[in-house]
Image (cartoon, rainbow, N blue to C red):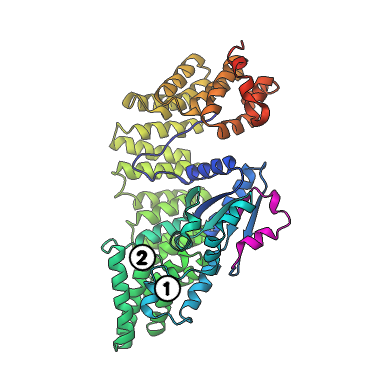
Amino acid sequence: MVNFTDADEDLPPASPEEQYQDLLRALRRRRGFGLLFVRCSPAEAEKLVKQVKQDLPQKTIEVLRFEEPIDNLYSIVQDRPDFQHIKVLFIQGLEYSFYKYEETKCQQGWDSKAIYSYSWKGVPHILNHLNQHRERFRDDFQICFVFLLRSFSLNYFIHRAPDFFDWRSGLFDFPSKSEECQHEDFQNQSLNPEERNKKIIAIQERLETEHQTPEEQADLLVELGILLLAAQEYEDAIANFDQALEIKPDHHQVWYNLGVALSIIGRLEAGIDSFEQAVKIQPDYHEAWYNRGLALSDLGRNEEAIESYDQALKFKLDNYLAGYKRWVKKLLVLEANKSGIESFDQALTSKLNDHKYCNKRAVDLLELGRNKAAIDFFEQALIIKRDDYEAWNNRGVALWKLGQKQAAINSYNQAVKIKPDLQEAWNNRGVALLELGENKAAINSFDKAIKIKPNDGQAWYNKACFYALQGNVGLALENLKQAITLNPEEYREMAKTDSDFDSIRSDQWFQALININSGIGNRESGIGNRE
């Protein structure tokens, strides 16, 4: 049986779990050639591949990992003896081909203006190859290619391989926490891309044509690096920061900026070293301590990350992000001792009157499985804004996960009282009622959900589960048929392994519904007429 909920409308459109489920559905549905793009860190990529292999055991899934530049992906795939059997092929490490290209463009005689404002005239060999051979990929491979890319690598596809990228059938986003925060920190909101490009070119020309003191040159290199960082030209930004540090090795802000750029492109160890240089020069540099913690967290070094967040809090107690990160990691690693909670409370004092903030933190904790902590935040949000129906609904989900079914139903009741057409709450309420044995009320709740959103298969599927458990084969099949009609791939796959259907699994009509090749159309009239 399924229980779904959406995040608050003021939160980002899709949580990592929702993104993952969308990706999983896309891979289940895919038959033959396809192109999917996933924005994620190398560490996230490894987790993602492992999880997909577990969740889609019926598909032949392989991974191509590159640690050196390549020019011809087609031949590499075709030369695999098993390529005709592969259904999903993850591609990881293409950024090495882009690094090599960036390193050589200066050696090819590009002037300073062309290096940055080349209007995407230069194309790395691998992307030229993909643009020119996309039809061959489609015609010769019955494979869904999933490209796992950092942000800057994805920009290469968007701008320099548009013919290939335009064939994508999905784009999914799993940024690391460090990438989300660091990238956001360096968005120059006062300059649009055109203005930023002009400023970059002007600085480059000054560096070439004017005579500056070493200190003036270092300042220009730092300004240029920060602009390039905001433009997601990370390798060029790093090169400028390195040059500036040759002139001013004790400039703590340059070490910090260098650490950010290195962390964003996945060079986390080097990024940590840069943050450590920054705090060695200026020990109270709380931003560097915080970002060092993020990079350590991305490497799975959670206890070291906590220590780094503690340092950020030591120098800036109202750094609520550091407090939140410290506390969550404490929960996950050290089981949240009293001092951890006190640090968290102190760090969040200024934020606890913002119901949107409390909702967002609660949803984060819910996704981490920290249901009790999530309930605390939902309740804080409801103290601030009593009619927040999404908080009531999500609080119900957290209570339901803790086994507090009646309390969850009460919470769902509040949600639908405020917003009677909240379909998710009616569906969630029905699931909880079934588990309490209140079958008639549960079916009424599912029927409400269906009336509000008849094209959503969740409630249809849940009704089918209920009737199957009751031994009512006819109604179970009728409702399951509705769910599968609305979303064949998802609900057919779920029904194949859902224990709720064990009592009717051998029924020929059930087999007809879950088997794509069984000719459902020939049996449709029979399903509805069964008793």
Q: Residue at x 42, y 26 (%)?
A: 453
What kind of element bears circle 1? helix
429 inside magenta stretch: no
Classify residue 280 by image quadrant: bottom left
For residue 452, above or below residue 90? above
Which of these two is toward me, 347 or 134? 134
Dividing the image into 4 quarters, which one contains the N terminus? top right
Residue beneath disc 2: 230
Task: Work out how far the residue at label 1 is from the one at label 2, CA to CA, in angstroms.
Answer: 11 Å
Dividing the image into 4 quarters, which one contains the C terminus? top right
What amino acid type should be assigned to the residue bearing mark 2?
Answer: Ala
Q: Residue furthest top?
A: 531
Position of residue 83 measured from the top left corner of the image (x, y, whole percent): 69, 54
Please indicate, yes or no, whether residue 475 appears anywhere in the rendered image: yes
What amino acid type should be assigned to the residue bearing mark 1?
Answer: Asp
**Mark 1 nearby-residue class (10 Å; few <14, some 14–19, many ≥20):** some
Q: Is residue 34 left or right of residue 394?
A: right
**Mark 2 nearby-residue class (10 Å; few <14, some 14–19, many ≥20):** many
Magenta stretch: give its range: 71-90
Residue beneath disc 1: 236
Position of residue 104 measured from the top left corner of the image (x, y, whole percent): 50, 78
Q: Residue at x 29, y 87 (%)?
A: 210
